[in-house]
Image (cartoon, rainbow, N blue to C red):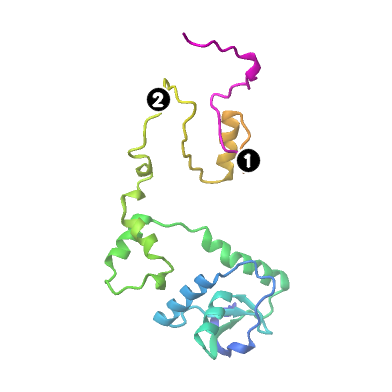
Amino acid sequence: MTTWPADKVERHPLETLILYAKNARTHSPEQVDQIAASMKEWGWTNPVLVDEIGEIIAGHGRVLAAGQLGFSDVPVMVADGWTDDQKRAYRIADNRLAELASWDFETLADEFNALGDDFNAEFAGFSWDEIEKLWAPENDPLAEWQGMPEFEQNSKMAFKTIAVHFPDAAAVEKFAKLIKQPLTEKTRFVWYPQQPNVVAIDKRYEAAE
């Protein structure tokens, strides 16, 4: 029968665990505080994964939170016999695969609604501002456009400022190709339809009588 690291969970002294020096996943002080708040509420629910010498493969944030809370020992699973490549790849996969999941925001809002008034949002990793947005009408993707002035083609104003939201860099690039204009970090104005520059000396002005 195949054995897995999760088949055996044991307690190791916190001081014996080694943070992986090249861990690509960063943990801000604010996030460590959130993890610590969660551990205070529910205890330790997800053991740290280490190799034979105690170097961490998965669980850096939990270990940092444990140090903050003053824990002396922590639940550990040992990945026995893993190659360096397997450990390196799992460090990436453990974080990346979780990112690829998505939320059903309507159901999430219902779940928060079902919680009691004493619930601390830090336990779940959400701020109260984020939770309030779940309940607000701004969840409607068209809501941010409500009440915005219509764009009048016959307007004589020199320009209009319009905020456009793009989901990613690829969408920005696609938009730049559509309007046939480059968009960089220094771009402040977009002219559409794009007009050739007109040198001021070519214009003739006459005083009105």
Image quadrant in which you'd find residue 126:
bottom left
- What residue is at 58 percent from the left and 42 percent from the top? 170
**The residue positioned farthest toward the front in the image shown:** 209
Residue 59, how many percent across, how many down? 57, 76
Residue 173, how many percent across, how many down? 60, 38
Q: Quadrant of the N terminus?
A: bottom right
Please report whichever mark, 2 or 1, sits nearer to the chain's N-terminal start. 2
**The residue positioned farthest toward the top in the image shown:** 209
Image quadrant in which you'd find residue 52:
bottom right
Q: Is residue 108 left or right of residue 201?
A: left
* Label 1 crowd bin: few (<14), some (14–19), many (20+), radius 10 Å: few
- What residue is at 46 percent from the left and 36 percent from the top? 162
Majority secondary structure of magenta residues: loop
- Magenta-highlighted residues: 186-209
Is residue 9 visible to the viewer in this orientation of the structure? no
Query: Mark 2 belongs to which amino acid?
Result: Glu
- What residue is at 56 percent from the left and 32 percent from the top? 190
Is residue 46 visible to the viewer in this orientation of the structure? yes
Residue 140, how many percent across, how many down? 35, 46
Q: Secondary structure at mark 2?
A: loop
Query: Mark 1 belongs to which amino acid?
Result: Thr
Instruction: Tell me the number on the disc at residue 152.
Output: 2
Between 120 and 58, the residue placed more toward the observer is: 120
Residue 36, how many percent across, how many down? 47, 78
* Label 2 crowd bin: few (<14), some (14–19), many (20+), radius 10 Å: few
Instruction: Tell me the number on the disc at residue 168.
Output: none
Between 204 and 143, the residue placed more toward the observer is: 204
Q: Which residue is mark 1?
A: 184
Q: Eyeballing the image, is 163 above or below 21?
A: above
Is 100 magenta? The answer is: no
Image quadrant in which you'd find residue 14:
bottom right
Marks 2 and 1 sit apart, C-alpha to C-alpha, by 27 Å
